[in-house]
Image (cartoon, rainbow, N blue to C red):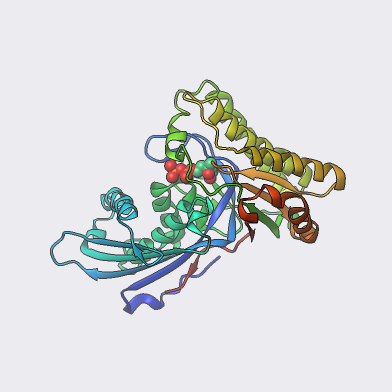
Amino acid sequence: MMTIDQSYNNSNIIIWKAASNIALVKYWGKKSFQLPMNPSISITLDQSTTTTKMEISKNKHLEREIDFYFENTKNELFAKKIENHFKNIEQEFPLLKEYNYKISSSNTFPHSSGLASSASSMASLNLCLASLLLKNNIIEENNFYLTASRLSRMGSGSASRSLFPSFAEWGIESEDYATNIANIHKNFSDICDAILIVSSEEKTVSSRIGHSLMEDHPFKDSRYKNAKKRLLNLLKVLENGDWSTFIDIVEAEALELHAMMMCSSPSFILMKPNSLKIIELVRSFRADTGLNLCFTLDAGPNIHLLYPLEIKEQVIKFINDSIDPFLEDGFWIDDNIGQGPVNLS
Ligand code: DP6
């Protein structure tokens, strides 16, 4: 696994880059404080990343200050969210109150692409905080990633999985933090993700509200039962390399997530007509060609196309020839499985 470069030891600047992730078995519904109602599995991406730079200085008055810049511009709204996050974790790590922070964050993907950046931004921010804790001997090196994952989870559940290379699970070993899935068949080792931007509009219902609507959901018991069953099947599939069952599980999960939204009270629909059009096209393409291409969605209208690297040429042709008219400004992101966070300090 990654080694922790401690070159920042004498410096007051910590920089981490972390990627977004796409869930195969979805986290949808919480209990207690930021704990999942069911375990989830995701692929850590490579290209869709956030880099966070944290400049720290000793705070002499015990009134911690946070300045937050997003894409080089001061952002008070994000600063408020980060302030809340600090308050949550300072109860456990009071040392964090002893510093002032200037935090600058930037994404590789456009903010207006409709892609959620909470996973990559929370992961990179909390890696910086974990580095600070490590530097002060508050945590040990062998707990570094698990602590960073746990802190990230407290900021945004899905972020807990962005701390690990390739495939990660959250909720099997622990609900507190995510871990890496070690046994992955070579058929999935070079999996690609074409992220098709159907709409970049701000979502009408946030994930936070969506999670809370699961509390009194009429189908919640079957949803959690299905998710657990699919997760166990998917773990087997990831070991045995069976793409056909992988496709069944991943598409069923994506559609069930959106079905939950449609049946919530109040009901909401995050897919757009073009999302459905693309789903139909993917299924016809698969029927016509027999190639291993499938779709999944997060809590939004954009489609992630998952496929093995060996069919990349055919997939790009399919996107250009058939999918392009259903994309916003023809925009899609060419991403793939990633190697986990990078310390740039
Ligand atoms: C549909 O992690 O964004 O992407 O914990 O409230 O920040 P919070 O929610 P968030 O939810 C992600 C939901 C999902 C599925 C998933 O990534 O597992």
Is 54 placed above or below 158 here?
below
Q: Residue furthest top?
A: 218
156 or 35, which lies in front?
156
Numbered label tally:
0
Residue 171 visible in the current orientation? no
The C terminus, quarter of image:
bottom left
Residue drawn at the location 33% of the way across and 58% of the way down: 75
Is 248 placed above or below 189 here?
above
Residue 253 visible in the current orientation? yes
317 or 184, which lies in front?
317
Residue drawn at the location 51% of the way across and 59% of the way down: 110
Residue drawn at the location 41% of the way across and 70% of the way down: 15
The N terminus, quarter of image:
bottom right
Is residue 328 left or right of 95 when viewed as pictured?
A: right
Is 325 placed above or below 312 here?
above
Is residue 78 left or right of 49 when viewed as pictured?
A: left
Q: Position of residue 134 (x, y in %)?
A: 36, 65
123 or 68, which lies in front?
68
Q: Position of residue 308 (x, y in %)?
A: 75, 56
80 or 245, which lies in front?
80
Is residue 58 left or right of 259 when viewed as pictured?
A: left
Q: Position of residue 86 (x, y in %)?
A: 29, 53
Q: Position of residue 132 (x, y in %)?
A: 33, 66
Residue drawn at the location 51% of the way across and 55% of the way down: 162
Q: Residue furthest left?
A: 61
